[in-house]
Image (spheres, rainbow, N blue to C red):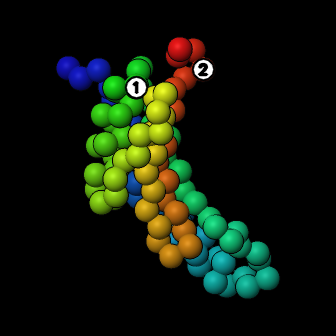
């Protein structure tokens, strides 16, 4: 048994919500939109090695490199026009 679990959100619900948002914004031009919108996936794990392993698994399908920021922090992102899909992994506050 692995020492981690990947828990996804409800994929269909997220995609439907994004489409609903896009339709709403298209139908309501007076509603402002952010200049740099983003969607974030937060990776957790018991230690830096586990977080890195999980982050590598979730970023691989994005086709972008995982960046090691040091001290147990990892990040990756892919841009879709002005919208950024961002993956980040950070130590817990209890971790040294």
State which quarter of the image contains the N terminus: top left
Residue at x 52% of width, y 16% of height: 95
Q: Is residue 59 above or below residue 29?
A: above
Q: Is residue 32 above or below residue 70?
A: below
The mark found on residue 93 in the picture is 2
Q: Is residue 72 left or right of residue 20?
A: left
Q: Position of residue 84 (x, y in %)?
A: 52, 63
Q: Quadrant of residue 15?
A: bottom left
Q: Is residue 35 above or below residue 27?
A: above
Q: Residues within 10 Å of mark 1 (few under 14, many from 20)?
A: many
Are the residues flagged by discs 1 and 2 in contact, CB closer than 8 Å? no
The mark found on residue 48 in the picture is 1
Q: Position of residue 3 (x, y in %)?
A: 29, 20
Q: Quadrant of residue 4?
A: top left
Q: Position of residue 24 (x, y in %)?
A: 65, 76
Is label 1 in a helix, a strand or a loop? helix
Residue at x 67% of width, y 84% of height: 27
């Amino acid at each position: 048994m692995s020492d981690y679990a990947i828990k996804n959100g409800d994929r269909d619900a997220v995609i439907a919500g994004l489409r609903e948002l896009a339709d709403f914004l298209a139908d309501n031009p007076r509603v402002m939109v952010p200049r740099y919108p983003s969607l974030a996936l937060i990776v957790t794990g018991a230690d830096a090695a586990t977080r890195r392993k999980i982050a590598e698994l979730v970023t691989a399908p994005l086709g972008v490199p995982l960046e090691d920021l040091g001290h147990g922090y990892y990040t990756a992102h892919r841009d879709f026009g002005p919208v950024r899909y961002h993956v980040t992994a950070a130590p817990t506050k209890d971790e040294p």
